[in-house]
Image: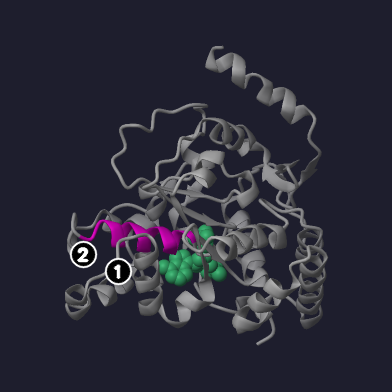
Amino acid sequence: MEKTEVDDDINELFETLPQERNWDGRWLCQYKGFWCPVRCFRPIVSSERHFDARDTDILLASMPKSGTTWLKALVFSIINRNNYSIDQTPLLTSNPHALVPFLEFNVYWGNDNPDLDTIPNPRIFSTHMPYELLPNTILESKCRAVYICRNPLDQFISHRHFLIENKIEKDAEPLDIDEAFEMFCKGIHPFGPFWDHMMGYWHSSLNNSRKVLFLKYEDLKEDIVFSVKKIAEFIGFHLSEEEEKQGLIEQISRLCSFENLKNLEVNKLGKNRVIQNSSYFRKGEVGDWTNYLSPSMAERIEELMQMKLRGSGAISQANVILSTSHHLSWGD
Ligand code: A3P
């Protein structure tokens, strides 16, 4: 069968899905339990069907606004450290998203079956897709995934600023923060529910620690040197003693730091389709939610997370997440 015949049923499948409007006016559709932006439904299904993973591929996965840009910069720098010196790296002139494409927003956007064969190893891709929607070849191959998670309250606030700043749905009037928060609590937000997204990768990291590395934004903030080493080790590009002595980890950390990337011209002035590069670099802080959300809203999310995770039969793992990261216990 021709590719187009195979893929024509994507529209039929789409028609069967529940749809809701996100608070910013964009349409979401519920696919296999997750609320996906309608515009990337086709790319998601196309990647499910056509992406042919290599054992050497590296996938960077996240909920939006969890530190994806940072992770892209770090992984790109670790992998390419012998190809570019720190003062000549493409990161100085390109936004990290231009160097590591999203499967659903770039690679399969407008092309159901792009030719990815010519990309040299190791290929780095990123995605906001939940684990449950990843193409089978990713799950079956030996390729590795690095997932970055963030306190949901900070993720919610960061996403709110990002969508308001970029106003992707030009004619829509965004709902106020209380209504948006209500939707978040119902799990209706891009790639939500948050807890299901997080738990998919959390479980897989427990079941196969060689397949998925589960990182927390807050841990990177706390100790970036340790995190860089851990990431490098996991993706099979560990830093030698010699490199450590030369201070390479510190150099990569500085290069990819919020302050450094934010102040580069490309990230101040550049634009990627409808997104301003500057909007990927707002505050870069832990706990900014306290400036926007009340303690009772935070309590509500904490209770909801506990309940959802208990309901999934994953309470012991949930407790590990909640207790090992004080930043994911939302209070302090
Ligand atoms: P805030 O909006 O809270 O500032 P993503 O990259 O997944 O879109 O996430 C964006 C969030 O990560 C934003 O959070 C942004 O400021 C922060 N961020 C971007 N680059 C960063 C970096 N190098 N270090 C720390 N935080 C960074």
In the image shown, does 1 or 246 lie closer to the viewer? 1
Of helix, strand and loop, which mostly describes the magenta segment? helix
Say left or right for 192 vs 185.
left
Q: Does residue 309 sit above or below 123 in this rendering?
A: below
Q: Amino acid at mark 2?
A: Ile
Count up the numbered dots: 2
Colour scheme: one colour
- What quarter of the picture does the C terminus occupy? bottom right
Residue behind mark 1? 255
Q: Which span is picked out in magenta?
A: 68-81
Mark 2: C-beta under 8 Å from nearest atom of ligand 1: no
Which of disc 1 and disc 2 is earlier in sequence? Answer: 2
Q: Is 252 contained in the magenta span?
A: no
Do the residues under discs 2 and 1 have CB atoms within 8 angstroms? yes
Which quadrant of the structure image shows residue 85? bottom left
Identify the residue shown where x is 75% and y is 53%.
Answer: 23
Q: Amino acid at mark 1?
A: Leu
- What quarter of the picture does the N terminus occupy? top right
Identify the residue shown where x is 56% and y is 40%.
Answer: 136
Q: Specify the label residue 78 is tagged with.
A: none
Residue behind mark 2? 86
Q: Is 71 contained in the magenta span?
A: yes
Say left or right for 58 vs 88.
right
Whether residue 324 is visible here, answered yes or no, is: yes
